[in-house]
Image (cartoon, rainbow, N blue to C red):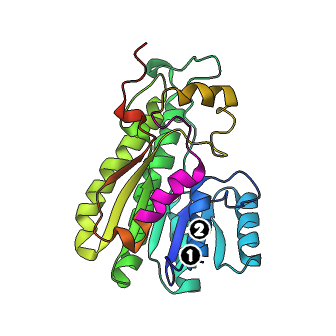
Amino acid sequence: MSDRFKGKVALVAGGANADEEKLLGFPGLSALLMARGGASVIIGDIDDANGSQSVKKMQNSGLNATYTHLDVTSEDDWKSAVDVAVSRYGKLDIMIMAAGISDPSMPDATGNSIKIDKLDVDAWRRVMDVTNLGMFLGVRSVVNPMKEVGGGSIVLISSMMAKVVREGSNAYATSRAGMTHFARSAAVQYGPDNIRVNSVLPGWTYTPFTAKRFTEEWMNRMSERIPLGRVARADDIADGILFLASDEARYVTGSELLIDGGVTAWIGPTA
């Protein structure tokens, strides 16, 4: 087993799906792989049942893992999650902010989407709060513990939709674009403290978050739009997250790592 993260303490927000006996999300898989690589991992989520079960299985296999309830829009929940990390494991080295929410303006099964003038204000605000308020509170909560240990790594999970637009997804795409710019701003501010801040921009990925919409028929159709010819798996994204979280990326900060199979590089089929 690799000791890539030996001695590290990592907090993963939105990582409840870490049970490898089920369909894994890439945040949960990232948490599982960091623990297998020697890290002590705190998984924070609002899905308490799933998160607790995942952590119990990790503990039963000899891994250092803890679950804590974390609503990323709650300042108190972030403080509590950081307190768990520091009180139980003595420090905090890594934070992955991967909490997300579906955008009600996304196209439905028939391809219809909600336009900006018809989108409910509260629905827009909820997407922005989970993504943008969540990242702000998360970064604000972890930088001081990271300073105390001489630095750290923060990875914000954005989306390829930060780069391109499609029908609907107005709130989602805007919030994810905000994440990438916030990551650059935080990278500049905390670079002198040896705290690296980067963003990962996944493309279409089959996870528990997308499984209801990503039918086999849909994925086959989308594969024609992806230069690498397939929708991503959770491990395709997790590998990029782990690189940025690890010391292998010690000179990488303020960057955007696109993991989209080439979608945003291509205008698409011309015939």
Q: Residue furthest top?
A: 271
Tell me which residue sits at (30%, 55%) in the image: 255
CB atoms of marks 2 and 1 within 8 Å: yes
Tell me which residue sits at (35%, 36%) in the image: 163
The stretch of residues the image draws in magenta is 227-243
- 148 up-or-down from 31: above or below: below
**Which amino acid type is shown beneath numbered disc 1?**
Gly
Q: Position of residue 41 (x, y in %)?
A: 58, 73
Tell me which residue sits at (38%, 39%) in the image: 162
Q: Tell me if residue 234 is in the magenta stretch.
A: yes
- 200 up-or-down from 220: above or below: below
Residue 27 visible: yes
Residue 205 shown left or right of residue 152 in the figure:
right
- Rendered image: mark on residue 251: none
**Which amino acid type is shown beneath numbered disc 2?**
Leu
Q: Position of residue 224 (x, y in %)?
A: 52, 26
Quarter of the image with the N terminus in it: bottom right
Residue 70 visible: no
* SS at badge 2: helix
Q: Tell me if residue 245 is in the magenta stretch.
A: no
The residue where tag 2 is placed is: 33
* Closer to the camera in the image, 202 or 139: 202
> What crowding class fits label 2: few (fewer than 14 Cα within 10 Å), some (14-19), or many (20 or more)?
many
Q: Position of residue 214 (x, y in %)?
A: 64, 33
The residue where tag 1 is placed is: 37
